[in-house]
Image: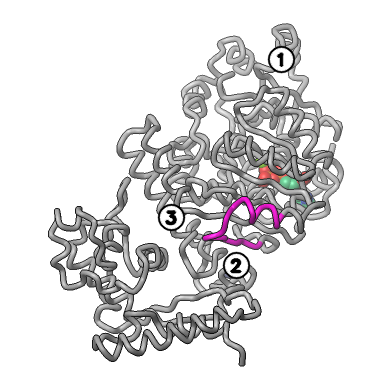
Amino acid sequence: MINQSEDILKTYFGYETFRAGQKKTIDYIRARHNTLAVMPTGGGKSLCYQIPGMSLDGTAIIISPLISLMKDQVDALEALGIPATYINSSLTASEQQTRLNDIAAGRYKFVYAAPERFESSLFMSIIKRINVSLIAFDEAHCISQWGHDFRPSYRSIIPNLNQLPNIPVTVALTATATTEVISDIQSLLEIDNEHIVKTGFERENLSFHVVKGKDKSSYIRSFMDKHRDESGIIYTATRKQADSLHEQLAKRGLSTAKYHAGLTENERKEAQTAFIHDEKTVMVATNAFGMGIDKSNVRYILHYAMPMSIESYYQEAGRAGRDGEHSDCILLFSPKDVQLQKFLIEQSLMDDNAKQHEYRKLQAMMNYCHTHGCLTSYILDYFNDNEAGAKSACGRCSNCLNRQNRMDITEEAQMILSCVKRMGERFGASMTAKVMKGSRDSRLHQFGLHKLSTYGLLSAYTEKEITERIQFLVAEKWLSTKDGKFPTLQLNENAVEVLKGKATVWMYTAPIPANEPGDYQKELFELLRQLRKRMADEQDVPPYVLFSDATLKELSRYLPE
Ligand code: ADP
Ligand code: MG
Ligand code: ZN
């Protein structure tokens, strides 16, 4: 009998070499250590329990959150000649009975089951009698309330498993690598530090892009025109968005499928199959779509709205490029997305503590949208995966590509930071922007903020521009937020350095598209230049207060040589 892991890999699965982390995980499980494998989506987690499941005696039980996922995995194993089955609510009572009998007779090497199954005394009585080789918790982050997809039923399995006469070795697999989720899984499933296998999270074939300040529908239209024949997923934040976007794209003659929780099971199944088999090129879906989907040639993941956390984003974006070919992950950001996510948190049944936690994750997601640093590095840092010395710029994300224009905004930053300080660190970005703009909003009077020396200091900017600067400062950690529904701005160590004049704050801007300058643009530029000069002369204010050198430089691009 074939028993070496390498032989099983070659003979049954037809692969030559293990991927990062697979061998180690398999070895730990075979040595009967409870193990946690943290690998990115598409990293090959299934093999980590399938190979030990084949070499250990008995039946492996895999706990899986999704019915569709179980069937796919079982079909794949059966196609390889490995006896496998699943038990879930999609089966009729008599089908279930037959399968349970076969399980009791020890006919299967692998049994996939939903967590709820462990509440059934019949099921429990059967697995108590058979020889269980291992228990695998697939998508194990579902067990943690800090994860992005918490399922209480996942957690309630543990006391049931403890009833088994011989407690089998447990393996947990997930693509979520935040410290809290990891330590939660560890303590619930009794996994010690030595038996965590974590592979690098960087997916070198993925390019991340954040698109801001564009009309989303027209962006998608022109994007789709260029990528007509490529397979891709568009994620929306709501079912309604999915419905209307799907309709728009279908009207344009694109081959589109749609998937969300408001559709019948049949409709969803059909949409999924059509997409997987390349009968439809574009999938418009909510986050209900995709967990465990193994489609290799997805060329782009376009987020129509910002998701609630970096975890969710990376998991969804990670469905692109499983074949290793270059793929794009694009996030269309608008400030409204933040409102929606806040609303969802407020409406949820979480306690205050959990809500605070969600707000913190949301803030990190917003910072991703506002940073000017490398997006890849940002994500890796978030998962604590950027080892010292790792390169800090991927060279392929939208921020790395748009680094042409660098401007020194130290002075603006100093003004903003001192304004935050004068406001007593009790207000958020939008109030601060109002003060700096010199807004007549009555709330300013209510708090006496119109009397501050920083009132109106950036009056030459729009409130929106000032807010963007503040968000940038937060994203780049020059300023902190105290979390909550309305996060307040707080000075941190970096802010102090800036205020003391010991640090320089750089901002990066994308080059302005090289349009031919129209006459009115030239005229406008000249006007602005004169205006700036006159105002500076007359009012004795430094010119950057009116508009910065960098702004002027940007505008000058419109001028002929
Ligand atoms: P995950 O669960 O981590 O998202 P999967 O287990 O679904 O990933 O595997 C993703 C793809 O990678 C599958 O098509 C699988 O067959 C393939 N794969 C897994 N391990 C290897 C390997 N060692 N060599 C080549 N392909 C592999
Ligand atoms: Mg998987
Ligand atoms: Zn980058």
Disc 2 under 8 Å from ligand 3? The reply is: yes
Q: Residue furthest top?
A: 94
Q: Is residue 26 magenta?
A: no
Of residues 78 and 317, the one drawn nearer to the viewer in this rendering: 317
| Residue pointed to by mark 2 | 398
Q: Position of residue 186 (x, y in %)?
A: 47, 42
x 29%, y 67%: residue: 437
> What numbered label is drawn on residue 364?
3
Q: Residue at x 67, y 26 (%)?
A: 67
The residue type indicated by label 1 comes to Leu
Quarter of the image for the N terminus: give it.
top right
Q: Relative to residue 467, is residue 254 depicted above or below?
A: above
Mark sitting earlier along the chain (3/2): 3
Number of the front mark, 3 or 2: 2
The magenta stretch spans which residues?
Answer: 207-223
Q: CA distance from mark 3 to mark 1?
A: 42 Å
As helix, strand or loop, the secondary structure at mark 2 comes to helix
Residue 508: x and y in percent read: 49, 75
Q: Callout 1: 10 Å neighbours few (<14), some, many (20+)?
A: few
In this picture, residue 310 sits left or right of residue 133 = left
Query: How far is the residue under mark 3 from the one under mark 2?
Result: 18 Å
In this view, 412 is above or below 342: below
Residue that carries the numbered disc 1 in the rendered image: 91
